[in-house]
Image (spheres, helix red, strand yellow):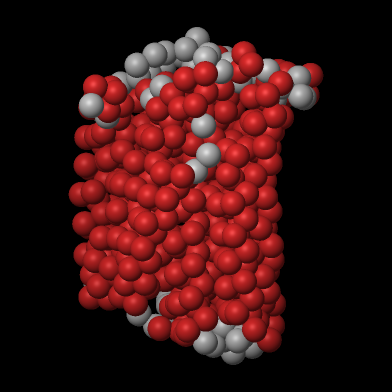
């Protein structure tokens, strides 16, 4: 009980609250803002035009988000990181408020909204990720991130179905509700306080040279960057593609929200198994079946040309339930590998590399989405043939995401065997696993 109180103090609870609130914002953007754009007929264009707009929205958003880490690190090393979380929260509030005022004219100003969302979320997440690294001790990483992930999953149980029904009634009303949730995000951001502040540097070139010079000892870190690229290229695009297919097939936001809520509820069982049984040595047992089943579900959708409701629902179920394992492993390693390698002073550089590789993968898959809209537009009508081709490519990238996480875990095991000083002691090593 004493250890639990040390883990979940006010700062830790505030981090979890911020994570859940920004998760609700992402639900609104990634599911229902996308669905709203997809169903937009302001210019009387075919659906392929709206697919292109969605792809361009994400290209601008992800580029702005990734590039924000190139300059934010210079300020973060000398200032309280919670300030950046708070400023980002305030900017997010303003961006959502803009979406509310734009209403049906949103698609006209979509590039501006994408830029503002990327800039504000970049401010928020740059401070958030680095602040988390200084607030939660390494020995509590696995337990904390599992609990945080379960709480985050909880938002995906309650809010998708609620938001879906409200959006079907009036999109602007939901946007206004989101503004109030953003205000709550601002409040919780002020309650996060780091337990230990490291003397930090921010020189990406110098850190890159260090990684190249110490290739063997930093191998887990480089595998983590690689897995981040594949994560960005697959997971986020899968969400967008699934939204497109559900909206095209079922035609309502409430259906989209209901599916997300039901299958997220089922994923809590997966999280329990992960928390109870996952270890580095068992990575392949957990990760490989997950990516194979998700890829197989995509094959089912492509084989039916995206016309089978059953195939779409099966994919949505398998992906939502099993993807939580991959994300949990990715999140915990993102936060812990740098400190496991005793690179405490390079947390800012490490976070920048993480976000840049993640953004690179996201931009890559968003470009594929734009191209699918262009080629489907050439075919005429409401063709989604190239959307399905993109989904097949993304499924392959998802398999590589799972494999790269296995490589991360194996490289950590190898370091455990070869370099006993990687961990402070045997107890620390056992908990970190």
Q: Residue at x 49, y 26 (%)?
A: 430
Q: In this view, does 128 lie to the left or right of 396?
A: left
Relative side of 173 to 35, left or right: left
Quarter containing the N terminus? top left
Q: Residue shown at 68%/18% (left/top)?
A: 419
Whether residue 307 sits left or right of residue 40 in the image: it is: right
Q: Residue shown at 68%/74% (left/top)?
A: 389
Residue 153 in picture, x, y percent from top left: 35, 53
Tell me which corner region of the image, top left, top right, bottom left or bottom right, holds residue 2: top left
Q: For residue 353, which quarter of the picture?
A: top right
Q: In this view, does 384 lie above or below 176?
A: below
Q: Viewer-proximal residue, 379 or 160?
A: 160
Classify residue 107 as left or right of residue 419.
left
**As drawn, 429 above or below 63:** above
Residue found at x 33% / y 58%: 156
- Spot occupied by residue 328 in the image (x, y as percentages of width and height): 47, 45
Count of labels in the image: 0
> Whole-percent x and y of residue 28?
35, 59
Q: Quadrant of residue 79?
A: top left
Can residue 97 be seen?
Answer: yes
Q: Nearer the viewer, residue 159 or 77?
A: 159
User: Can residue 27 be spotted in the picture?
Assistant: no
């Amino acid at each position: 009980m004493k250890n639990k109180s040390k883990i979940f103090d006010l700062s830790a609870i505030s981090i979890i609250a911020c994570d859940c609130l920004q998760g609700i914002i992402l639900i609104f953007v990634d599911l229902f803002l996308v669905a709203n754009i997809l169903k937009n007929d302001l210019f009387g264009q075919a659906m392929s035009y709206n697919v292109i707009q969605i792809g361009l929205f994400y290209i601008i958003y992800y580029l702005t988000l990734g590039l924000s880490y190139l300059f934010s690190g210079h300020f973060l090393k000398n200032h309280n990181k919670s300030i950046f979380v708070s400023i980002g929260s305030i900017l997010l509030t303003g961006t959502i408020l803009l979406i509310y005022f734009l209403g049906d004219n949103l698609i006209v100003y979509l590039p501006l909204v994408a830029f503002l969302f990327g800039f504000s979320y970049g401010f928020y997440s740059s401070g958030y990720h680095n602040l988390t690294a200084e607030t939660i001790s390494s020995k509590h990483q696995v337990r904390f991130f599992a609990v945080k992930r379960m709480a985050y999953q909880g938002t995906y149980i309650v809010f998708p179905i609620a938001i879906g029904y409200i959006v079907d009634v009036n999109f602007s009303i939901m946007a206004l509700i989101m503004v109030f949730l953003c205000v709550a995000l601002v409040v919780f951001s002020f309650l996060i306080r780091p337990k230990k502040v490291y003397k930090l540097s921010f020189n990406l070139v110098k850190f890159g040279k260090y990684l190249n010079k110490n290739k063997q000892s930093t191998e887990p870190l480089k595998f983590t960057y690689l897995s981040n690229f594949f994560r960005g290229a697959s997971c986020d695009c899968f969400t967008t593609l699934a939204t497109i297919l559900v909206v095209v097939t079922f035609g309502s936001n409430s259906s989209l929200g209901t599916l997300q809520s039901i299958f997220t509820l089922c994923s809590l069982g997966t999280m329990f198994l992960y928390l109870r049984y996952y270890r580095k040595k068992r990575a392949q047992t957990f990760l490989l079946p997950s990516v194979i089943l998700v890829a197989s579900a995509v094959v089912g959708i492509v084989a039916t040309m995206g016309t089978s409701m059953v195939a779409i629902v099966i994919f949505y179920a398998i992906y939502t339930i099993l993807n939580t394992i991959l994300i949990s492993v990715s999140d915990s390693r993102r936060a812990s590998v740098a400190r496991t390698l005793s690179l405490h002073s390079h947390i800012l550089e490490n976070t920048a590399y993480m976000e840049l590789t993640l953004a690179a993968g996201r931009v890559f898959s968003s470009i594929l989405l734009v191209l699918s809209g262009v080629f489907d537009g050439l075919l005429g009508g409401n063709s989604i043939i190239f959307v399905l081709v993109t989904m097949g490519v993304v499924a392959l990238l998802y398999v590589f995401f799972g494999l790269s996480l296995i490589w991360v875990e194996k490289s950590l095991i190898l370091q455990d065997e070869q370099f006993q000083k990687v961990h402070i002691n045997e107890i620390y090593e056992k908990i970190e696993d």
